[in-house]
Image (cartoon, rainbow, N blue to C red):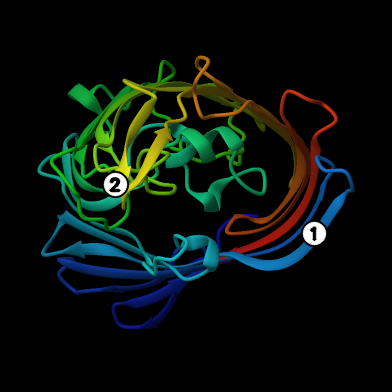
Amino acid sequence: MPPTAAMPLAEGLEAEFGRGITLRSDDGDFSLTVRGRIQARAAFTRDLAGEEPADAFAFLIRRMRLVFLGHLGSPKLLFYIQLGFAPGDLEPGYFNPIRDAVITWMPTSQLGVQVGQTKVPFNRERVISSSALQLVDRSIVNAALNLDRDIGIQLFSNDLFGLGGYIGAQLGVYSGNGRNRINRDLGLLYVARLQVQPTGRFDDAYAEADLLRTRTPRFSIGAGFAYNHRTHRENGTHGAFFQLDEGFDVFHAEADVAFKWNGFSLLAELLWRRARADTQTGVVDGVLVTERFGSAFGYTLQAGYFVSVIELAARFAEIRPTHEGSAMPTQRELLGGVGWYIHGHNLKLQADYGVLFGDRLVDVMHQARVQLQLFY
């Protein structure tokens, strides 16, 4: 369905579904857009890992977000703020609704600097917004091995060397402990990412599903590397905190491919992380404590195809420990889904069914989900 036309509310004020409510100054030096998003989900699981099947069913608001974005003084000075209010938007035991709070300066159309809290530019699946997924949620590989959000500074270019969108790059330094966390020490997270579009500009390379259905194939290749010095969390920038103060030095690497053509889309990722030392031992409150880091690698293969406004999609994902002694167990995910794109990603109904399992095929968890998204 084509986007609706903007509806003027007053001078300098307009509203448009899928673009929010926008206030602009007459001289164009100021703009403010407000958007809201909700994902309402029903989920059923059956876990067969125990002696008796364990069933669970829930209705939940998976995500509820409020977004403020615009520019100040000049279109070269941008801001983006995103707040999350659903339980899944918050870390357990830590009320912090701030998901993004970033200021961007674009001295040229090819070069920008970002300061604040935002997604770490590492793997494509994580950088893609949860509003633009073709299945109900991201993969188990992303959940375990991504670098999530952090506070820091990033230098980036979406059109390196001004070649017309063929090359993009990001370099960043972050705190290394996740959203709005103060470092215990001098350990930081260093990140570099490069993406190449051999077919030229690829404006929807960071959105799943081929809504544009172009007759010309579009192709993007990405790679990222990160070093997290003295991380204190089990997944680098997210997850539970370790008790010992030493921290783990962890290397991260990834490679990804995105392809779209005439309603068909393909996303493939390979993620790897390895701690310099997997085990640490120390004394906490008089008790000897041993902690282990989950060094692992994983891959995701995901594809979808449109039939009218309906998309069929499927995914396989697997996580394996890099070596004996890692705290990460083997995990696998296989699922298929269907999406009804009533108004693109801004109004869609999705359903998927999958199985999660490890080394033993009998230890299977079945999962069925239905989700409605409205993104004004």
Q: Is residue 163 above or below residue 211?
A: above
Tell me which numbered mark, 2 or 1, is placed earlier along the sequence. Answer: 1
Q: Nearer the viewer, residue 250 or 280?
A: 280
Q: Is residue 345 above or below residue 362?
A: below
| Residue 166 position within the rendered picture, expressed as x and y whole percent measured from the top left | 33, 21
Task: Specify whether 291 is left or right of 207.
Answer: left
Q: Nearer the viewer, residue 221 or 289?
A: 289
> Looking at the image, which residue sits at the far right?
52
**Viewer can see residue 150:** yes
| Residue 168 position within the rendered picture, expressed as x and y whole percent measured from the top left | 29, 27
Helix, strand or loop for disc 1 = strand
> Looking at the image, which residue sits at the far front?
286
Q: Nearer the viewer, residue 198 or 182?
A: 182
Residue type marked 2? Asn
Quadrant of image for the N terminus: bottom right
**Viewer can see residue 307:** no
Q: Are marks 2 and 1 in contact (CB under 8 Å)?
A: no
> Looking at the image, which residue sits at the far bottom?
10
The residue that disc 1 covers is: 56
Q: Residues within 10 Å of mark 2 (few under 14, many from 20)?
A: many
Q: Residue at x 27, y 58 (%)?
A: 180
The residue that disc 2 covers is: 177
Q: Residue at x 34, y 78 (%)?
A: 13
Quadrant location of residue 216? top right
Q: Residue at x 34, y 69 (%)?
A: 33
Q: Residue at x 47, y 71 (%)?
A: 85
Residue type marked 1? Ala
Helix, strand or loop for disc 2 = loop
Residue 43: mark in rendering: none
